[in-house]
Amino acid sequence: MYFKFRSLCVVFLMFLVVASVFSGGQKEFEPIPGFSDEANQQLAKVFDAIAEEEGEVVAAFDWGKTISHKKEGSGYMSHNIIIEHAKQNPEKMEACNAVIEADETDADDYFILRSSSYWKGIKADDIAKLGYEVYKNEFEIFPAMQDLIQQLQAHKVRVIIVSNGDFHTMRMVVEKELGLDAEKSLYAFRSDVDSSGVCTGVLMPPKGEGKSKDLVVSEIIGDQIFFAGGDSAIGSDGPMLDMAKFQLAVNPKQEDVQEVKGRWSDAIIVNLK
């Protein structure tokens, strides 16, 4: 009797292994804590659609206030890292103030040029280490967004981050916190680095044009992506969301919700804290 029972167990286990092989071992979408029931139902359909896609499946996300946010108050990571660096290096305070002034004008091209110039002559690895230190002290990733990205990766979706921040300040955070290869996944403004690992201040492509993240995406991916998410759906992230089959709007302003739904009838809206 014991032998028959053990044989049945072996047969059942073999069945599970074979079923896993034929299904590609792909897990079902698991509802994400922090997302509403409606959002999770919509996401379940998105994940069902992944299997029907041919070729590489790409999901593109904004970074600041979409994936990561400041623990207290407001602010952008790349900005705060420059401020922290200037505090530690008072001779850079004038250059820091120029970056802050450019940021307050909301002229992205000008801000990017000033920021890149700020890091000229500094080792990229030192910038990355400081970036991670500031991130750990002042910022965090929304747990729900981390869960979403992990599930997309488990479904073999290529996740990319498109940001108006600085590559070197974000690199270590993306690698350590999300497990992404920054060289293949992070598209942010980026100073060239010389043979000794020092930033030259010369911007590398793809640059886009200020807030035009869609231009960056089209340059590296093409005309259409599978999924896109941003916190400024009616603003700078909108053109990137327009490129996607499925859209995710993170923390939209109450007055923008109807406009988001009007622009993308099936947009997934999530409100995170």
Image: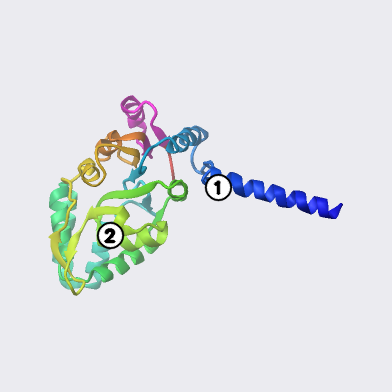
Total numbered labels placed on residues in the image: 2
- Of badges 1 and 2, nearer the viewer stands 1
Q: Where is residue 190 shown, x and y percent of the image? A: 20, 58
Looking at the image, is 95 positioned above or below residue 51? Answer: below
Compared to residue 31, the image places residue 132 above or below, namely: below
At mark 2, the secondary structure is helix
Q: Position of residue 73 (x, y in %)?
A: 35, 52
Density class for disc 1 (Cα within 10 Å; few <14, some 14-19, many ≥20) is few
**Which residue shows up at 60% across the image and 47% down it?**
18
Q: Is residue 78 above or below residue 43?
A: below
Is 156 a magenta residue? Answer: no
Report the side of 12 relative to 160 (left or right): right
Question: Is residue 253 rendered magenta in the image?
Answer: yes
Identified by mark 2, the residue type is Asn
Q: Is residue 234 left or right of residue 99?
A: right
Please say whether residue 24 is visible from this viewpoint: yes
Can residue 64 be seen at all in this image of the molecule? no
The quadrant in which residue 114 appears is bottom left
Q: Where does the image place residue 103, in percent across and percent down from the top left?
A: 19, 52
Which residue has dot 2 on it?
80
Give the magenta part as a residue range.
247-269
Q: Earlier in the sequence, mark 1 or mark 2?
A: 1
Residue denoted by label 1: 21
Q: Which mark is residue 256?
A: none
Name the residue nearer the viewer: 224 or 186: 224
Q: How is the image coloured?
A: rainbow
- Determine whether the residue tagged by mark 1 lies in a helix, strand or loop: helix
Describe residue 8's horizontal placement relative to residue 72 as left or right.
Answer: right
Q: Position of residue 160 (x, y in %)?
A: 33, 49
Q: CA distance from mark 1 to mark 2?
A: 47 Å
What type is the residue that disc 1 sits on? Val
Count neighbours of disc 2 (C-alpha within 10 A) and say few if under 14, some if 14 to 19, many if 20 or more.
some
